[in-house]
Amino acid sequence: MQDTQRLRAIQQLAYKYVPNQPDSARLLAEIQQKFAIENNLPAWEAKALNIIGLSYRMQSNYASALEKYKQSLILLKKTGDRNTMSAVYGNMGDIYRLQSNFPKAIECILNSLTLAEETGDKKKTADAYVSIATIYYEESENNSKSLEYLLKARELYELLGDKQGLTLVYGNLSSIYLDEQDNDKALYLLEKTLGFQQSMNDDHGAATSLYNRGVVYTTLGRYADAFADLKQATAIFQNIRDLEGLADALNAIGNLRLEQKQYSAAIEVCRDALLMSRDLSSYSITEMESCLCLSTAYNQSGQYRRALAYLQQYNEVKDSLQKQETLQTLKKMELARKSATDSLGREKERFHIEMEHQHAMREKNKLLVWFLVIGLLILIIALGFWIRMLYYQRRVNKLKAHSDNLEKQHLLYEIALLRSQVNPHFLFNSLSILSSLVRTNPDLSEQFIEQLSRSYRYILEQKEQSMVSLRTEIEFILAYFFLLKIRFEDKIELQINLTDNLLDNRKIAPLTLQLLIENAVKHNRMSKKMPLLVQVREFDSDNLVVENNLQPRPGPIVSTGLGLQNIVSRYALLSDKPVWAGETERGTFAVKIPYL
């Protein structure tokens, strides 16, 4: 009993130190682990290993964290401690999520959720809901699913009075509103999150909220407020030795200095961020953002050779990240293909067994006929051979038809799956704008409703189509752009330079142009002084090009490349002509789309 009380006290103290003093937490947990080993208490040794893993995670040492979690799980499976096992699975899911290994992350989080529900642990159930919401947000940008699980988690956290859990919920909700460019709601939720974190002395959480708020302030042009928040965030990240958070915060300050045209200051902080990101890992989003910041700053300073060098490094990191993302997509498609192949293999095996059985039966019948009617032997053999070949041919034809049907169904499934990824976020924004127009400008609201109806009618009508005429797609784009124009006014422009001959005689995959325009809006800043210009024009006899001026949003933007990847994957299934995308020498971003 005395040993247990001592171990519990050490663990509670170590857990308290994890967010702000991970080194101290690890030292205490190692003392707990040593005492547990000496007294043959494997359950407490497993808990100590879990805290050691948490301390490494706070310092972005993911490999060491995973190693300790796995050691903890081995002991927990022997002791049967399902409560702690649920927590460890949840922590492992967090690491895999940070490494973008989403299949492993989902596996661990579902294990955590199952154990939590079995033991009736509402807190760990809510924690699992938050993790699932985060994966939906990061992997597929499915904000509706993220909101669903966040609201489930908030209900449980409020029931438990868990401030730390509510902090996670509000922080994630603020990220969703930031994506939807609803800065007022995002700032409100960040204020609530920061208040909870400061009341709990959660330095890591507070630093993250200050960083997020600083990025929002930069977007709004409130540079003094942005610098104050980002400076606080860097100090906290440095104090708790969170190098990944520190590198992101330095990049945010660099982007702020670019906005203020203080290029020397931007170079100084982004160089530090680049060195730090490369120490942590090779080819990360943080490294890519640092290279872009340095290239822009050197270019604006007139140091073009250095600007070019960092631009090349930026493209190298970007290409590597895109290759990693492509490999993940290919792995998923390969799993689906193997499933279909396995099904076909089992069908072939059943056919082979049936053929062997039929062959054995025919041989037996031929022997009986041989002994009974010797005179009819030649006729029976010929008849048997003919029946056998006819039966074999019919079975082969049936199997081939079944195989072709499986392959066709698999192809249609992949196309339908890719088409279902089209992000309908603009519906929410369109309805919000319509609500305002009905009160302020009824005539314009009627036009708005007509164009919104036309847009969604097109989406529904083309749902089952693999390709449409270019004119049909352009008519939908004009309706869709009318909605964007009402929303962004003079901040966005569209130019279409296509001949009537092209419009009537060329085809493309439906919703291709909508995805590219939506992608340009998402990733670029726009204002009346610097509007976003999207051009749709002929590239050559086999391709058209969609091009926009490159005005990246300030601060790191996490993107899965979903819209562009959707187009690349669909055209890979529909045509042998490749889709090309990248930055041009004119400082624009262009996507070359082949005609179908």
Image: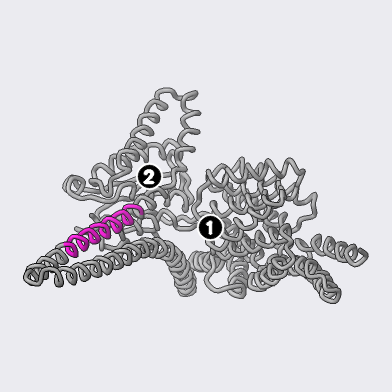
Residue sitting at 75 percent across and 51 percent down? 197
Q: Which residues are magenta?
A: 391-413
* Residue marked by disc 1: 558
Nearer-the-camera pick, 224 or 542: 542
Q: Position of residue 77 (x, y in %)?
A: 69, 66
Which quarter shows the N terminus?
Answer: bottom right
Residue sitting at 47 percent across and 48 percent down? 526
The correct choice, above or below, for 238 with respect to 545 in the image is below
Verify whether residue 54 appears in magenta. Answer: no
Can see residue 241? no
Which class describes the residues within 10 Å of circle 1: few (<14), some (14-19), or many (20+)?
A: few
Query: What amino acid is at disc 2?
Result: Glu
Nearer-the-camera pick, 465 or 483: 465
Q: Position of residue 309 (x, y in %)?
A: 47, 74
* Residue marked by disc 2: 493
Q: Position of residue 71 (x, y in %)?
A: 69, 72
Q: In which image quadrant can residue 62 be found? A: bottom right
Q: In which image quadrant can residue 391 be found? A: bottom left
